Amino acid sequence: MIEIPVLMFLAVCLVLLAGFPVALTLAGVGLMFAAIGTISGAFDASYLAAIPARIFGTIGNETLIAVPLFILMGNILERAKIAEDLLHNMAQLFGSRPGGLGVAVVLVGALLAASTGIVGATVVTMGLLSLPSMLRAGYSPALATGTICATGTLGQIIPPSIALVLLGDVIASAYQRAQLEMGVVNTATVSVGDLFVGALIPGLILVGLYLVWILLIARFKPDRAPAIASEGASLSELLKALLPPFILIALVLGSILLGAATPTEAAGVGAVGALLLALQRRQMNWKKLHEIGLSTMRITSMVFLILIGAAVFTLVFRGFGGEELVQGFFERMDLGPQGAMLLVMVVIFLLGFILDFIEITFVVVPIVGPILLAMGFDPIWFGIMLAVNLQTSFLTPPFGFALFYLRGVAPASLPTGAIYKGVIPFVALQIGLLALLWSFPNLITWLPNVLRSG
């Protein structure tokens, strides 16, 4: 007989595939199973009394206040045409060399990812700005689309990332629960800032891998990444386009890394700085400000509605004994810590085809996180591995979210097969990064430990 918690997960997947909204699906399936369980006597209805406290705790969480502020910062920078100016100047600087336009796209995409922290926004923006230019320049459709999709997902791992903000809050709770279950009384915990620091080196490595791949293609198959006619960008024009957003991002991240501000405080500074930058560039008026406000409100409402739906779902899941079921499964499998971690990574990778990172973060991680962290895994390493894993699933055909984002803005003449073909090498690079981080955990944990000890 299939256990009820397993049926809950299957029901969520089926309802989502039918096209229902994520937040309403999570809450609706949870409440439906709770009602059936209450009537049949399999569920204690007193669990539902905790729902108001869960909702209030989600809305009043100080860490999560950073989410709308980072979204506001990204929206302002996107509407201020920062990426457009950067791409134009970078293309003029590197475009005269084979593969130069691809290099420019990766560098601008990385900077845009650090500015917005939202995968969908980065993929769509880079698709609209750079895909026509790359195709006109004679780039292979597969290389052009693969570069844009892969670069767009950098917002998942390069701080300040919305995914890392959400993961940091969930992993902090999971780590505390794991310590209590082990009988460890320890006031130290993991913060969003720790995940930001831990993500820096893996993020830079991934950008480097993308650049190396593009340059190798340009070197051995120059017809797929040809040079473009370039007038050359003057140093003053390049600095004018590059320095303001770079300084803003450095200010936001630097204040977090140095401990001068919490992520929420730094997000507020970033939002105000982005607004001042847009005003200085004369790229802001009341109409744009109204649009930015509406866009920020929609995305924030979507995020928090999903969080509330996930809170209801996980509460009912635990009421049916779901956590004990998962823990018992790992004990029966007797995989050991490494085997259990590998199994969870594979499951999360597959779930990334049908669930967004927000649902996985707030539904799956609270269930498996305490179990894995109680096995002795470093919480920062665990968080970054999850982030890179989800980033990989966003790229993997046929269901990767980044592929759908780009398909939505790509010209109809561009075959979908070219997009799928183009992302495969980048998926391989990201799997290679996962293997590297698995083999050398210090690539993630070294910098946070240095800053903590300093």
Image (tube, rainbow, N blue to C red):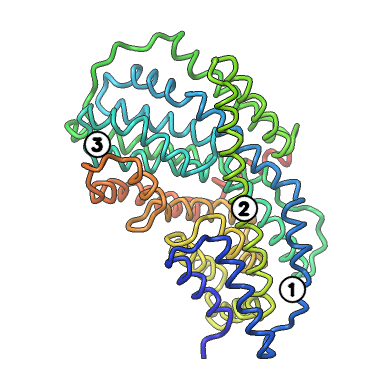
Q: Which of marks 1 and 3 is nearer the N terminus?
A: 1
Q: What element carries label 1?
A: helix
Q: Which of marks 1 and 2 is in front?
A: 1
Whole-Å distance between the Cαs marked 3 and 2?
Answer: 35 Å
Identify which amino acid the numbered label 1 is placed on: Leu
Q: Name the residue under label 3.
A: 217
Q: Are marks 1 and 3 in contact (CB under 8 Å)?
A: no
Q: Residue 6 carries which label?
A: none
Where residue 110 sits: x, y (%)?
46, 34
Mark 3 Cα-neighbour bin, 10 Å: few <14, some 14–19, many ≥20: some
Quarter location, residue 320: bottom right
Identify which amino acid the numbered label 2 is placed on: Leu
- Left or right of residue 96, residue 453 in this image: right
Q: Name the residue under label 2.
A: 167
Mark 2 Cα-neighbour bin, 10 Å: few <14, some 14–19, many ≥20: many
196 lies above or below 337: above
Residue nearer the viewer, 366 or 22: 22
Quarter location, residue 88: top left
Q: What element carries label 3?
A: helix
Q: Which residue is drawn at 53% across and 19% down?
A: 283
